[in-house]
Amino acid sequence: MSMSDPLGDMLTRIRNAQRSNHTSCVAPGSRLRANVLDVLKREGYIRGFSSEELRPGVSQLRIELKYNEGQPVIKEITRISRPGRRVYSKIKELPRVYSGLGVSILSTPRGVMSDQEARAANVGGEVLCRVF
């Protein structure tokens, strides 16, 4: 069965694994998901991730979750732009998550990046998700 929102599925897997205090979780692999995980790693929300090839053409992402004093580092992770309602933002209208304490992840013409990186590059795009 195909998924209508693969990125939303990965975010839900991360959310559920952290609520259950798992050290890692797995999600089906794709380039977009790997790019989003790369931004989460750069911003310090996850320890890391690795791609495992199950069979030719089918990969799986293993995500190492991060905890601080027993509490998950990710307090909130929500999908903003969904398949039924795409949300785009200009550079001047980029949302600030909790006054800059959180991060919005955007898909821009220059690749997937955080809102701070997008402001520095002066480029807008599709707001994929919000992390705090």
Image (tube, rainbow, N blue to C red):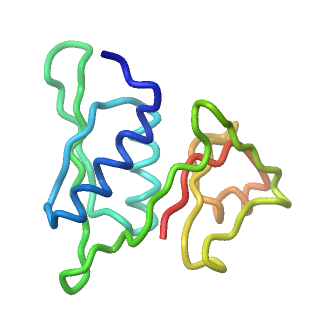
Residue 54 % position (x, y): 14, 23
Residue 11 % position (x, y): 38, 49
Task: Report the side of 34 relative to 87 (left or right).
Answer: left
Name the residue rendered at 61%, 77% in the picture: 98
Residue 24 % position (x, y): 17, 55
- Seen as rendered, the residue at the extreme right is 92
Q: Which quadrant of the view contains residue 51?
A: top left
Task: Report the side of 119 relative to 51 (left or right).
Answer: right
Q: Which quadrant of the view contains residue 6?
A: top left
Q: Is residue 71 above or below residue 55?
A: below
Quarter containing the N terminus: top left
Name the residue rendered at 41%, 51% in the picture: 38
Residue 8 % position (x, y): 44, 41
Q: Is residue 7 above or below residue 123?
A: above
Task: Report the side of 69 relative to 132 (left or right).
Answer: left
Q: Nearer the viewer, residue 98 or 103?
A: 98
Name the residue rendered at 26%, 38% in the picture: 27
The count of marks equals 0
